Amino acid sequence: MKITGLFVTLLVVLAALFTGSNGDPEPHFKKFKKAAKYSRPVYYRPAPVYHRPAPVYHKPAPVYHKPAPVYHKPAPVYHKPAPVYHRPVYGGHGHGW
C-alpha cells in the first residue's frame, strides 16, 4: 500500500510539473504542418512553384505481339560448323623464335 501511495504521489507531482501554466500562448506563433517533403506554414503562403516537379513524358512501351505459328514449313536443320585449322607453331611457346 505504501508503494502504491508513493507511486501515485510521484505521478501527481510529475503531472503538476509538466502541465504548469507558462502564461498566455504567443499570439503570433506560426503552427507548422507537414506538407509534401518539407515543413512550411501552410496557411501563410502557397508552396513555391519551383518545387513542383515538371511532368515527364515517356514514350509508350512497345506492345509485344506473339508471333503466329507457321504451318507446312520444314523444321530448321542444324549444320555443325566446319573445324577451323590453325597454323602449326614450331619452336617455343608461340614466340616464333
Image (tube, rainbow, N blue to C red):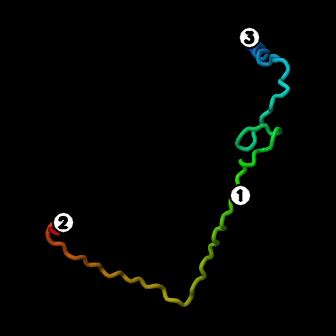
Q: Position of residue 24 (x, y in %)?
A: 85, 20
Q: Given the current orientation, which residue lies at the most extreme top position? A: 2
Q: Residues within 10 Å of mark 2 (few under 14, many from 20)?
A: few
Front position among marks 2 and 3:
2
Instruction: Where is residue 49? Give x, y as percent.
Output: 75, 48
Where is residue 6 shown, x and y percent of the image?
A: 73, 11
Q: Is residue 82 above or below residue 64?
A: below
Q: Which residue is mark 2?
A: 93
Distance of label 2 from label 1 (alpha carbons) = 63 Å
Please tell me which of labels 2 and 1 falls first in the chain.
1
Residue found at x 71% / y 40%: 38
Dot 3 falls on a residue whose secondary structure is helix
How far is mark 3 from mark 1, CA to CA? 64 Å
Q: Which mark is residue 55?
A: 1
Give how far across and how far down residue 19 sits, in percent.
80, 19
Seen at 55% across and 90% down, the residue is 72
- Image quarter hosting the N terminus: top right
Q: Residue at x 70, y 52 (%)?
A: 53
User: From what the image shows, is residue 33 above or below residue 69?
Assistant: above
Give, as a three-letter code, the residue at label 2. His
Q: N-terminal of the two: label 2 or label 3? A: 3
Place residue 90 in its image quadrant: bottom left
Tag 3: amino acid:
Leu
Question: Furthest residue to the bottom?
Answer: 72
Q: Is residue 73 left or right of residue 42?
A: left
Residue for point 64% across, 68% down: 61
Q: Is residue 44 left or right of residue 50?
A: right
Residue 6's mark?
Answer: 3
Give the numbered dot on residue 94.
none
Asked whether the residues under the numbered discs 3 and 1 touch, taking CB atoms below 8 Å apart as contact, a structural biologist would say: no
- Decide: few, some or many residues near mark 3? Use Cα within 10 Å; few <14, some 14-19, many ≥20: few
Determine crowd level at label 1: few under 14, some 14-19, many 20+ residues with C-alpha closer than 10 A: few
